[in-house]
Image: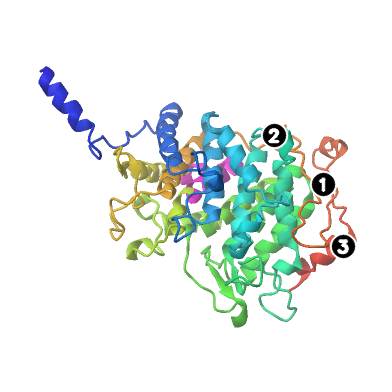
Amino acid sequence: MRLSRWIAAGILSLPGAFAALSAPDFTNKDSISQTAAEVAKDLLSFYKGEDPGWVFAIGILPGPPPDGDYFWWIGGAMWGTLLDYRRQTGDTQYDKIITRALVEQSGEKKDFMPANWTATMGNDDQGFWAMTAMLAAETNFPPPPAEANLDWLALVQAVFNEQTMLERRVNIPNSNCNGGLRWQAFSINNGFDYINTISNGIYFNLGARLARYTGNDTYAEYAEKTYELLERLKYIDEEGNVHDGAHLPENCLDVNKLQFSYNAAVMIQGAAYMYDITNQSQKWKGRLDLLVDRSLSVFFPGGIAYEYACEGVGSCNVDMRSFKGYLHRWVSQATVLAPHLKDRVMTVFESSARAGVAACNRGDNGQLCGFEWTQNGGAQSPKQTSAVHQMNVLGALTGLMMKEAEPPVTNATGGTSKGDAGGGNSLPNLRAMREITAADRAGAGILTSLVLAGFLGSCVWISLN
């Protein structure tokens, strides 16, 4: 008997011989939280920024290719995933790591534009980090240390202000693309002529969230104009499909109709914020319902998340293999602000999360997660592990816990991030929105619209076409 136990123990100590990740009781938040904790722990095993000798990697995952699998923006997405996990579970053990990462990558000018990443800086890359900072503000994540001289909300405002500038946009009055935010931040970068949905979608998302948090309706106006732009360009079509983008030389008529789930998800989350701040208007309800219904149809065949544009043919790169987590997190948060979505979303998301957990059966500990959650795609190696796979399953589990979540905080409901409406200085001549005062917040619905002439001049695009 003792020998049998010794042999069993020896077998279980061998790499790959561990049991797969245990599935939680999906009806119990505490049980989901325990499983999520295991996934989060394994996610951090891919991060080297806290290891001796890896000071250059603080805040980022190993890369970019060919030096590692991950581009800079994936680091920002990872911290956002962990912030959502923290919010839903109360697990604060990673707070110092998250804070150090965001501070380190905030950049010399406090706008998520660190000089060493300029050569590959996309507006979407910068925007992903800003979305994480926005989440920090919305969840009252502890502020950075005083010596960092940073504020979560101010970082977001700096990014938003810079991406509003005409230097980042198409400024050709007779062009169909006019007003579109470019994929790349600088003209020297490949892709500067691609006007893509994710860059504009993140800008829309941040505008809606800044409007809700600050009570400043100027942000909402920019968000509305961005949504209308994407509709006009047919990036969002009448059926609720969300396409990837088009090129300036083709007058934005060559719409790339590949559908990636993060494009739809970022629009859904932003639309839920607009629905909330417009007092559940029918216009935003219609837009939101259209996007959700179509996304459930496209991205959840059989009730399981599936990145159909690339998964079935085995062409998903590391970036694409991270999208399922955002899909779960962002759409789940949309249900917090638009509760009428909960029943139809959460039923599907539970079945998808079950499949995601079932795919956590690899790696040396036997519980690292895979990418494919359905039987439809077999082109990816079944032994492949990645930080983004962990992010996906953690996002799915975190999303389920949002069934009981409180709405994100605002400056009027206990938010502590102060902001800097005039932030952002990687480009010249930025114009500041007036800061929200105590009197504004006390007004409970009084929105500010005082905007200096310089900023209005830089934002002419919102009234074009």
Give the overall secondary structure of the magenta segment. helix
Image x and y of residue 43, in percent? 44, 41
What amino acid type is highlighted by mark number 2? Answer: Pro
Q: Which residues are magenta?
A: 326-345
Mark 3: secondary structure: helix
Q: Which residue is mark 3?
A: 454
Which is more toward the observer, 156 or 108?
108
For the point 71% across and 61% down, the residue is: 163
Residue 447, numbered circle: 1
Provide the residue designation for mark 2.
Answer: 145
Residue 45 painted magenta: no
Q: Residue at x 64, y 68 (%)?
A: 182
- First in sequence, mark 1 or 3: give its number: 1
Residue type at mark 3 is Gly
Can you give x and y, in whole percent of width and height, for residue 239 in the image?
52, 65
Q: Return the residue nearer the eye: 131 or 179.
A: 131
Q: Is residue 281 visible?
A: no
Q: Is residue 29 above or below residue 239?
A: above
Q: Earlier in the sequence, mark 2 or mark 1?
A: 2
Rendered location of residue 114, percent (x, y): 65, 54
